[in-house]
Amino acid sequence: MKNTRLTLKSRPTGRFSPDHFDTVTEDLPELEDGKARVRVVYVSLDPAMRGWVSPDTRSYVPPVPIGDTMRALGIGVIEESKTDAYQMGDWVTGFVGWTEYLDIGPGQLNRVPASVAMEDYMGILGLAGATAYHGLVNEGQPKSGEVLCVTGAAGSVGSLVGQIGKALGLKVIGIAGTQEKCDWLVKDLGFDVALNYRTDNLPAELEKHAPEGIDIHFENVGGKPFAAALQNMKAHGRIIMCGFISVYNGEQPDAYPDMTAIVRKRLTLKGFVMTDHFDKYPAIFAELAKLMQSGHLKYRLDIAEGLQNAPEVINRLFDGTNKGKLVVKVSAR
Ligand SMILES: NC(=O)c1ccc[n+]([C@@H]2O[C@H](COP(=O)([O-])OP(=O)(O)OC[C@H]3O[C@@H](n4cnc5c(N)ncnc54)[C@H](OP(=O)(O)O)[C@@H]3O)[C@@H](O)[C@H]2O)c1
C-alpha cells in the first residue's frame, strides 16, 4: 500500500505556494510492534502554520525542518494496531501532518469519542474552540454587561469568541472583511454589531456603538482594526492578543497603532498561545459542549478536497476567502 505526504522543500518569504513542498509517494512498511496506523481524514489549515515554516527558532515551537512532513493538526481513524493504546476504528486527533497515513506510538495522538460529528473536532472541539474559550474566558475574565470587540470576527476563532461573549451576557461588536460576513455575524450568530473594516470608518463606528468604550478587545488580525479598537478602549480595559494574521506573510502592518492609549487608558495587554494550555483542554471542551447543547454556538466548516491542494488552499486564510474553519479532506471517513 502507498502513502503520499507533502514535505517542506523551502521556506516561503510571502504566501504559501505548491513550489514550497515536495510530494513524496512511498510504500507503507509493515507496521512495527507497539505502534498503530492512522488514516488521516481531515487536516486543519491554520494561520499559525505560516509561522511554523519561518526560520525563527525563538518562537513558541521550533520551525518545521526542511525535508520533514508539513506539521498540521488533524483527525483520523486507526486502521491497524499493534499496541493496546489504540483499537481499530478509534478516532484520534493531534499533530498528524500533511500525510495520508502515519504510524504512531502510545500517547502521540488523543483518542476522542465518536459520539459527536468528526467535523466538530476540527472546530468547536478543536484548536479554534479552545482558543476562543480560553482567550475570552480565562484570559479576558469577562463580566455580564461589558462590551466586547473582536477582530477576524467571522473566522474560526472570532465567530466563537463573539458567540461565547453573547452567551455570557456581553455586548458584542465584530469586525470582519466583507458585508456577507457582517450579515452572517448579526443575523445568524446574534452579534450586536458587525463592522466591515474595508468600508466602515472603524474609529467613528466603534465610538458610536461603544460610547463608554470597549471593556475587552480580542485581537486576531492587527493593522487598522487593532488601531481603531485601541483608540476606543475604556479606561482599565483588557486587550487579549490572540493573533496578527495581517503580518504573517511578512507584510508590514498597515497602520501603526497609537500605543500611548495603553498608558492613557491604563490598559492590560495579554498575549497567549494555546500550546501552553493543553492541561485545560478537557475542562474547556466540557464547557463548550454545554454551550453547543444549549444552542449557543453555530459554526461553519469550509472543506477543501485533496491533500495535494493544501499548499494553495491555505492562502484563503490570508485573502479572507475562507468561510469558517478551513480544513482539507484527505480521505473518506
Ligand atoms: N494564540 C493562539 O494560540 C491561537 C490559536 C489559534 C488561532 N490563533 C490566531 O487567531 C487568528 C484567527 O485564526 P483562525 O484560525 O480563526 O482563522 P480565520 O479567522 O478562520 O481565517 C483568517 C481570517 O483572517 C482575516 N484576515 C486575513 N488577512 C487579514 C488582514 N490583512 N486584515 C484583517 N483580516 C485579515 C480574514 O477574514 P476577513 O474576511 O474578515 O478579512 C480571514 O478569513 C489568527 O491570527 C491566528 O493566528 C491564535
Image (tube, rainbow, N blue to C red):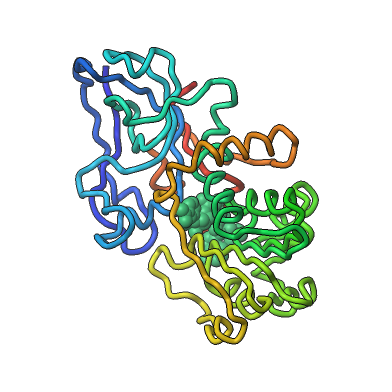
State left or right for residue 242 relative to residue 201.
left
Residue 192 point in image, percent of width and height:
79, 59
State left or right for residue 210 relative to residue 328.
right
Residue under the point 66% across and 59% down: 142
Residue 283, by quadrant, is: top right
79 to 197, vertically: above or below: above
> In which quadrant will I find the N terminus?
top left
68 to 238, vertically: above or below: above
Residue under the point 52% across and 83% down: 259
Does the rendering let one see residue 320?
no
Residue 155 point in image, percent of width and height:
59, 52
Residue 222 point in image, percent of width and height:
52, 69
State left or right for residue 161 relative to residue 18.
right
Residue under the point 63% across and 34% down: 289
Residue 3, by quadrant, is: top left
Does the rendering let one see residue 248?
yes
Residue under the point 33% across and 33% down: 99
2 to 266, vertically: above or below: above
31 to 188, vertically: above or below: above
State left or right for residue 311 relative to residue 218.
left
- The foreground one among 246 and 230 is 230
Disc tally is 0
